């Protein structure tokens, strides 16, 4: 059992703290936001993450997990302190490090015994060294400390299982004793542990996110070519995915990547590259393709419906991906804003993100369910692939729309079936009609899906 303090109760901090408590450690999670800490004391989660509430409750009850706004309380017994604060995009895409600086300064002023300070936030390469400088310059009297970079790879919606079953744990430090201690904390996870220097660990995080974003933009570019040549991008991705060197993950064509990580991290990496004199042309292309995926929807709707002024468009799914209520950089937000700027009237439905929707799309009309959404619509755009949308009563949707136009931005429906119901159906990279002599044999399950 180790004493751990986690600073920041966002996705990364709250999941990290709760999982370490569940692994038997004594954890205090700190946040400067009193409202969040009050919520957590009341057993309410500031974020929607499947399984988190039960895990928090279990560990609070067992006395292993507590919440506070006080660094004194958090650092009192701590041997390890994780920094897991936000690093939003600042000017020109540069990561804004004000919260990391505040955390480092407060740790330096509060610590009374040697500490291993572990940075989990996604921070520009070189930030670990900068944090070490801040701490040694702010400490009133010198106390031993070491800084370790331990980037997080968890995804919203599957954060707990990603934390507990990581593909790898990355630790960066020039202090091998500190790296060894942090490695010990992770031994129970039985994952490969990569120990490297601070800057390399920081870069591994950016390179991983940028690579996944690149795969998404790559398949979206292939989708655009498929549309012109009459091929089906879903089957192209499946056919590519059997090659072990390629794999099937992150090859779903659609409306592009969103959320609080990929857009911000690709931009920040581009910024770092530019500032240091390199030409990140691939990263730029990744971002351009991603932006175009949203614009193309509006272009296609204009071609299908004519002038969009006063047209009623339903956004089916508002969160940036399923199993989260997060709408940061969600395709629905950009598409909604583009449609609104052309005078369209926007309706929206999402199984869990409705409570945050007005913050992102102020004049959106929210509906009870997908059927209510369809009522009187000139078009529906599927923005998020929630599982329940795959099983809708589509003939019922068809009969309540004013014009039966569907833009399936996540390729969840079968083009043939949609045409059969009578929809004017659009998808991403799928204009080939199966059953017209071009049938594909039923394929066995992909290894990744087994
Ligand atoms: C991402 C990474 O996957 C995590 O490893 C990382 O820890 C996290 O960012 C972070 O840096 O904190 P997350 O943003 O939760 O996690 O979401 P993903 O599941 O990776 O999806 C990102 C976006 O890509 C979503 O908008 C999703 O719809 C889109 N996507 C994903 C596609 O368009 N196609 C795909 O094939 C896969």
Image: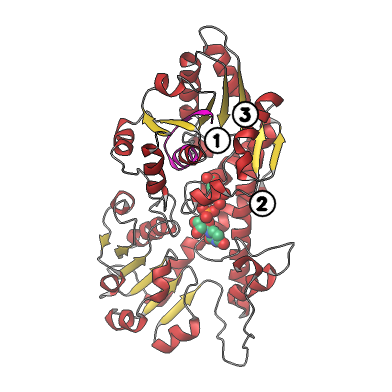
**SS for callout 1:** loop
For the record, the magenta segment spans 1-17
Q: Residues within 10 Å of mark 1 (few under 14, many from 20)?
A: many
* Foreground pick, 313 / 65: 65
Tell me the residue that label 1 is attached to: 120
Choose mark 1 or mark 2, whichever is in front.
Answer: 1
**SS for callout 2:** helix
Q: Residues within 10 Å of mark 2 (few under 14, many from 20)?
A: few
| CA distance separating discs 1 and 3 | 9 Å
**Residue at horizontal 70 percent and vertical 70 percent from the top:** 242
Tell me the residue that label 3 is attached to: 148
* Foreground pick, 107 / 428: 107
Tell me the residue that label 2 is attached to: 282
Q: Is residue 30 left or right of residue 281?
A: left
**Residue at horizontal 33 percent and vertical 82 percent from the top:** 398
Of callouts 1 and 2, the N-terminal one: 1
Q: Is residue 11 visible?
A: yes
Q: Is residue 175 magenta?
A: no
């Amino acid at each position: 059992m180790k004493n751990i303090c986690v600073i920041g109760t966002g996705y990364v901090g709250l999941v990290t703290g709760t999982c370490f408590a569940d692994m038997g450690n004594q954890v205090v999670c700190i946040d400067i936001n009193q409202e969040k800490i009050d919520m957590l004391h009341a057993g309410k989660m500031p974020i929607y993450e499947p399984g988190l509430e039960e895990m928090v409750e279990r560990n609070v009850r067992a006395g292993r997990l507590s919440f506070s706004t006080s660094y004194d309380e958090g650092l009192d017994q701590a041997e390890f302190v994780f920094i897991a604060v936000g690093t939003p995009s600042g000017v020109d895409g540069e990561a804004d490090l004000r919260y990391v600086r505040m955390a480092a300064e407060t740790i330096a002023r509060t610590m009374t015994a040697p500490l291993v300070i572990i940075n989990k936030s996604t921070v520009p390469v070189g930030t670990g060294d900068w944090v070490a400088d801040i701490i040694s310059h702010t400490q009133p009297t010198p106390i031993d400390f070491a800084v370790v970079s331990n980037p997080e790879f968890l995804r919203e919606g599957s954060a707990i299982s990603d934390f507990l079953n990581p593909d790898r744990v990355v630790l960066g430090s020039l202090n091998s004793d500190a790296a060894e201690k942090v490695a010990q904390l992770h031994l129970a996870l039985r994952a490969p542990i990569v120990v490297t220097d601070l800057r390399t660990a920081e870069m591994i995080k950016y390179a991983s996110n940028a690579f996944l974003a690149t795969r998404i933009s790559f398949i979206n570019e292939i989708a655009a070519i498929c549309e012109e040549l009459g091929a089906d991008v879903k089957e192209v991705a499946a056919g590519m995915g059997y090659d072990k060197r390629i794999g099937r993950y992150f090859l779903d064509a659609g409306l592009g990547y969103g959320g609080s990580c990929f857009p911000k991290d690709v931009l920040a990496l581009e910024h770092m590259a530019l500032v240091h004199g390199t030409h990140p042309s691939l990263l730029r292309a990744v971002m351009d393709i991603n932006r175009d995926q949203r614009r193309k929807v509006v272009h296609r709707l204009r071609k299908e419906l004519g002038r969009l002024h006063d047209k009623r468009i339903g956004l089916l799914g508002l969160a940036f991906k399923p199993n989260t209520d997060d709408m940061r950089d969600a395709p629905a937000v950009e598409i909604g804003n583009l449609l609104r700027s052309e005078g369209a009237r926007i309706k929206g439905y999402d199984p869990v993100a409705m409570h945050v929707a007005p913050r992102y799309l102020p004049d959106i009309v929210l509906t009870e369910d997908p059927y209510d959404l369809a009522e009187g619509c000139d078009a529906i755009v599927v923005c998020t692939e929630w599982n329940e949308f795959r099983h809708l009563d589509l003939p019922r949707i068809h009969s309540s729309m004013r014009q039966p136009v569907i833009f399936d931005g996540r390729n969840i429906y079968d083009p043939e079936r949609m045409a059969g119901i009578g929809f004017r159906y659009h998808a991403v990279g799928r204009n080939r009609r199966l059953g017209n002599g071009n049938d594909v044999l039923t394929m066995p399950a992909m290894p990744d899906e087994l």
